[in-house]
Amino acid sequence: MSASIMHTRAIIEEGKSRMQQKSEKQRREELGEFLRTRRARLSSEQIGMPKAPRRRTPGLRREEVAIAAGVSTTWYTYLEQGRDIQVSSSILASLANVLQLSAAEREHLFTLANLPPPARVTRLEEHMLPLYQRVLDELGNIPALLTGYTYDLLAWNRAASYVFGDLAALPEDKRNMLWLLYVQNPFSQRITVFSEREQYAQEVLEAFRGRANRHLDDPELLAFIENLKQASPRFSEQWAQHNVRTTCTGHKTLDHPRAGRMHFESLTFQVIEYPDIRCHMYVTADEPSKHKLHQLLELDNASLNMPAQSKPSRRLAI
């Protein structure tokens, strides 16, 4: 390798190093500015300290934040000044608590400190469910489901109810995809699953494991997993394989008890406000499947005007 090429490479590497140092300096300065603005909006009384005399500048003093967070005033001053010091997740969490940060602010703080934000289980708030139900209903002829972080079935639209069955007829504690796929009981016996049942069940398990690994300190989650392992040897065996995936494969085949074979493309979307919530949509993959789906929905419309005893029964298909 010639000396000129080596010199050019050295210049390029030096330029990269300078850019990285500049980026790190900007990140630390942004972190300091963020901390200053957060303490400026609080009073000493709001963090459980005695009322302070009137000050020229609003908010907490650095020493008050440091004392409340259990760190030295010098260290905290260096942090706000953007100096290159080591910061741990536990100290950041303490600062977030003292400064009474929201969930979004807490995540922003960890990002600025170049640390992974602490995992938190996000459950759909009860008062938000009607809004998400309206979103599902607006999808019209596209079957759609909303699932929680343990694959609980939270909501579904009319198309899903007719293609996959009358989910509302299931007791609330039985509306869980993993239990319906892995545990044999009177409710799972009513299910007509995708033709690739075994594969689909394992895909759901692996996608669930990918989410669950972020919350293994949650006692409720650990109990859910342990109960499933006790109830299903197959689940226990596949759980021990430690396979993970982000989502299930796209193409799905469904043998509907009345409409026959239909093909769907599966799409999964994450709800930004609730990262553990997923919206699953199933779009017909070909014209025959689309026609059969429309026939099912038309039959559903017709059955609304039929006497109760004449209405066709709905068998659950997932």
Image (cartoon, grey):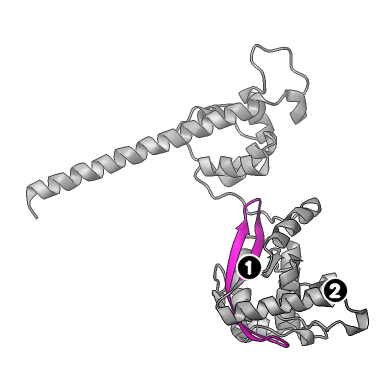
Q: Residue at x 65, y 63 (%)?
A: 279
The numbered disc on residue 281 is: 1
Q: Could you tell me residue 136's position as x and y percent? A: 70, 61
- Nearer the observer, 303 or 139: 303
215, 66: nearer the viewer: 215
**Residue in front for this viewpoint, 67 or 177:** 177
Does residue 78 belong to the magenta stretch? no
Label disc, if present, on residue 304 of the rendered structure = 2
Quadrant in which residue 12 is drawn? top left
Res. 100 in view:
yes
In the image, residue 106 above or below residue 297: above
In the picture, the quarter occupied by the C terminus is bottom right
Q: How crowded is mark 1: few (under 14 residues within 10 Å), some or many (20 or more)?
A: many
Magenta part of the protein: which range? Answer: 253-282
Answer whether residue 281 is magenta in the image: yes
Disc 1, SS: strand
Residue 91 rendering spot, x and y as whole percentages: 60, 41
- Is 19 positioned to the left or the right of 301 in the image? left
Amino acid type shown at disc 2: Leu
Element carrying mark 2:
loop
